[in-house]
Image: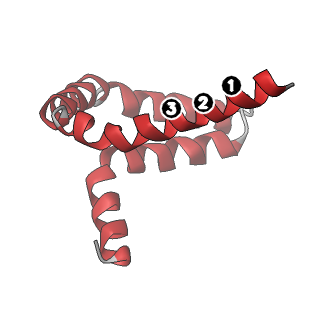
Amino acid sequence: MRTNVNRTVSFTLIAVLYAMQATPAFAQFTGAGTQATNWVVQILTPIIPLAVAVVGVLAWTGRVNWGWFVGAIVGTALFFGRDQVVTMFRGWTGT
């Protein structure tokens, strides 16, 4: 029983130490992350409106729930408006 407690305490300590070191380590990848995000947006830009249209037709014919169509619309708005949403939340929190 004591071994399990020691393992748990050791694992928690190591996880906390790794978490404190994560911020400086991830800071160097901000440029690559932006490039990857832009690439994904370029790939999905022609596909997303077609997908929303397909889900709309499926909802209209009763094949899927209308919640899927609403979810597709909200997901599209959040996907393409992510920068504005982040700016809005930062304005609310004052950061």
Residue 90 occupies quadrant: bottom left
Q: Amino acid at mark 1?
A: Arg
45 or 91: nearer the viewer = 91
Q: For the residue labelled by badge 2, is the local secondary structure a helix, a strand or a loop?
A: helix
At a point 87% along the width and 25% down the height, the residue shown is: 1
Question: In the rendered view, does 16 fall on the left or right side of 80?
Answer: right
1 or 68: nearer the viewer = 1
- Disc 1, disc 2: CB below 8 Å? yes
Q: Residues within 10 Å of mark 2 (few under 14, many from 20)?
A: few
Q: Amino acid at mark 2?
A: Ser
Q: Which is nearer the N-term, disc 3 or disc 1?
A: 1
Q: What whole-number distance in Å separates the C-alpha atoms at marks 1 and 2?
A: 5 Å
At a point 33% along the width and 39% down the height, the residue shown is: 21
Q: Which residue is mark 3?
A: 14
Q: Which mark is residue 7?
A: 1
Question: In the rendered view, does 61 fall on the left or right side of 24?
Answer: right
The correct choice, above or below, for 42 with respect to 23 in the image is: above
Q: Amino acid at mark 3?
A: Ile
Q: Residues within 10 Å of mark 1 (few under 14, many from 20)?
A: few
Q: For the residue labelled by badge 3, is the local secondary structure a helix, a strand or a loop?
A: helix
Q: Which mark is residue 10?
A: 2
Q: What whole-number distance in Å separates the C-alpha atoms at marks 2 and 3?
A: 6 Å
Q: Could you tell me which quadrant the C terminus lies in?
A: bottom left
The correct choice, above or below, for 94 with respect to 2 in the image is: below
Residue 65 occupies quadrant: top right
